[in-house]
Structure formats: structure tokens, C-alpha cells
Image (cartoon, rainbow, N blue to C red):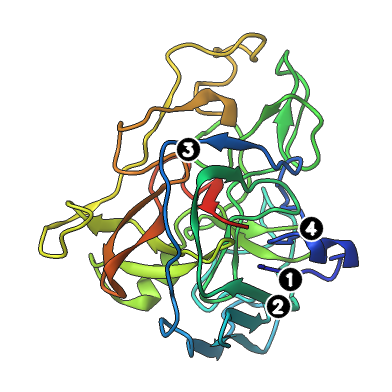
Amino acid sequence: MFHFIPYPLAIAAAAAAVMTLSACGGGGSSTATTTTTTETGTSSSTAGVLCSYSSSVPYSGATLSTNATAAWSCSSTLRSITANGLPDHAIGTFPNANNPNTITAQNVSASVTLAPTKTSVATSRTGPMAKPGMALNGIVFDPGTAGTCDNTGAVCDLGKGTGAWNIEALGQSAFRFGTDSNNAHVQPQGTYHYHGIPEGFVTKLNKGNAMSLIGWAADGFPIYARYGYSVATDASSTLKVMTSSYRTKASPDANRPATSLYAMGTFTQDYEYVAGLGDLDECNGRTGVRPEFPKGIYHYFATDTFPNLQRCVKGSL
């Protein structure tokens, strides 16, 4: 079980969720839909991998004089973190013209299984109570937003919209969410969170064009940034930038706001998954070897294009 309680407004009932996180300045409605796939898997152990990862560095923001802290540990069955939710790398200016919120320290506490089991089901991890994972530095991955538009496109709300069309934080220019160079911004509760590749954190890891393990998913499988082997099962194959298997649809869905107002790619519903189009499956993952897992493991990727961060998990929850 992965219990996140990173925000002051977290509620006790949330502890029953596998990953519990308050809504993003976006997050959308919580969903728990599943889709059956043709892939199946077995249990994998992540024991011994980054079990003692910790960081305590001066926070670079102007509003606090403290350290950004995160510490992971492992028991016989669980990987756990305690952190204060402050980024440990350079950040943009918050508040800013498109994000009025100030970063504040949070109470982050989370645990995830050391023996994730890949299943034949892809389980959605979007919405305020179901985030897909957390970075090693204790910053949550939160790809969706709460921004929506109605069918006309005339009524749009970036905070708590009730329209049917979900606005993407990245990859569109019609709306601005005030994200910084780390593809991150701040929730009203003061929580800094990533919508895409955490560029500053990847830079801090200082692995260059190598594979970088940047976090853990709600199901316990690892999350990597951008680079993977060109042949998933061959550690001697060349490295390449992983590509997702999503694309914008050839034509908009019925009742969508006019593309003359909002180009395709503005809304989550503008994208479709096409198996085999890229390197990754519908959850932005694949099975293969990694430096930390020479025998192979299922793992996720943060990618440069939609979905940027996985919107579902393949492991047992």
C-alpha cells in the first residue's frame, strides 16, 4: 500500500487509498477505471535499490529559510519516505502571474511495496486522491489538472472546473498554469508538484544522457526519466529517448469546443493510445533491464510528450 499524506488538508479517510494526495491546482475528478490488456507479469523485488536515499539541501525559494529534506528507508516488505515537500533544486518564481500560490512545507509520509506485481490490468491514477507516483525528493507526480472547459469553450476554469473537457497543463498554449522549467507549479495548499519531467531534479542527479531513476510509482515499480535501452532486454544496446504511444486524434470528439478556439492537444480527450506507436504501453511503461535491475523489471517513464507522466499503473494495488 502507498499512503501519501503530503498536504495539511489530507483527511483520515484518504488512508484507505493506495496513493492518497490532495487535488492539484489541478487534478480533476478521482477515477478508478480499469482497462484489460494482453500483458501479464510476475512479482519483482526492488529490495536493496535506493533504500537509503536521502537528501537535505538548502531550499532555494525566497519564502522559507530551511532545508528541503527527503529520506527513504526499507523494511522487509515496504519502502517508505518522510519529506517536507520542498524541492531540492532551482525553481521558478511563485507566486507568478499564472499561479498565485506560495510554496510551503508539507508533511509527506508514504510507503510502497518492495515486491510489486505486474497484472493484466491498467488502473487509472488521476484525480485528487489517486496520484501515480512520487519523486525521490518527496515531490509528487501529478500529471492532470482540475482545469476544464464546457462544450462551447466559452466557460473555462483552471482551478475547479465542472466542464467535460479536461485541460492539459503541458503541451498546449491556450491556457497557462504558471509552470516553471521543471514542469511544476504550486497548489493552493502550497504544495509544489510535477506535471512532467522534473528537469531540475534530473540535472541534480547528474547522469547526463544516462538512465535516471527518479521515483517510485503507486504500485511499487520504478519511474525513470526519458532514456532507455533501444532494445528493452539488452543492456548493451544503445540508449535512446523513450517515446510514448499516444498521439493527438485525427479529428476532435463530438461536442468538443471548436479547434479554432483550442487546438488539438489542449484537452486530455484529444489524445489516443495506439499500441506499438512508440516504445511504451498505455501506462508509459515497459518491461526490460535497467542498471539497478539487470534481470529486468516493469518500469515507467517520464516522457517529453503526452502523457508526460503515467496516468495509470500496471501493478497490483
Q: Horizontally, is 53 left or right of 18 in the view? A: left
Above/below status of 129 relative to 61: above
Q: Are marks 1 and 4 in contact (CB under 8 Å)?
A: no
Residue that numbered label 2 is attached to: 109
Q: Horizontally, is 133 left or right of 246 in the view? A: right
Which of the two marks, 2 or 4, is nearer to us in this view? Answer: 2
- Mark 3, Cα crowd under 10 Å, few <14 / some 14-19 / many 20+, is some
Q: Horizontally, is 17 left or right of 230 in the view? A: right
Q: Secondary structure at mark 3?
A: loop
- Mark 4, Cα crowd under 10 Å, few <14 / some 14-19 / many 20+, is some
Q: Earlier in the sequence, mark 3 or mark 1?
A: 1
Residue 188 badge = 4
Q: Secondary structure at mark 4?
A: loop
Q: Nearer the viewer, residue 290 or 208?
A: 290
Cα separation, mark 1 vs mark 2, equals 6 Å
Cα separation, mark 3 vs mark 4, equals 23 Å
Cα separation, mark 3 vs mark 1, equals 27 Å
Q: Earlier in the sequence, mark 2 or mark 4?
A: 2
Q: Are marks 3 and 1 in contact (CB under 8 Å)?
A: no
Above/below status of 18 relative to 293: above
Q: Earlier in the sequence, mark 3 or mark 4?
A: 3
Q: Earlier in the sequence, mark 1 or mark 2?
A: 1
Residue that numbered label 3 is attached to: 171
Cα separation, mark 1 vs mark 4, equals 13 Å
Which amino acid type is marked by label 4? Answer: Pro
Q: Are marks 1 and 2 in contact (CB under 8 Å)?
A: yes
Question: Picture coordinates of residue 267 (x, y %)?
Answer: 59, 28
Query: Residue at horizontal 55%, vertical 90%?
Result: 56
**Count of all numbered marks drawn on residues in the image:** 4
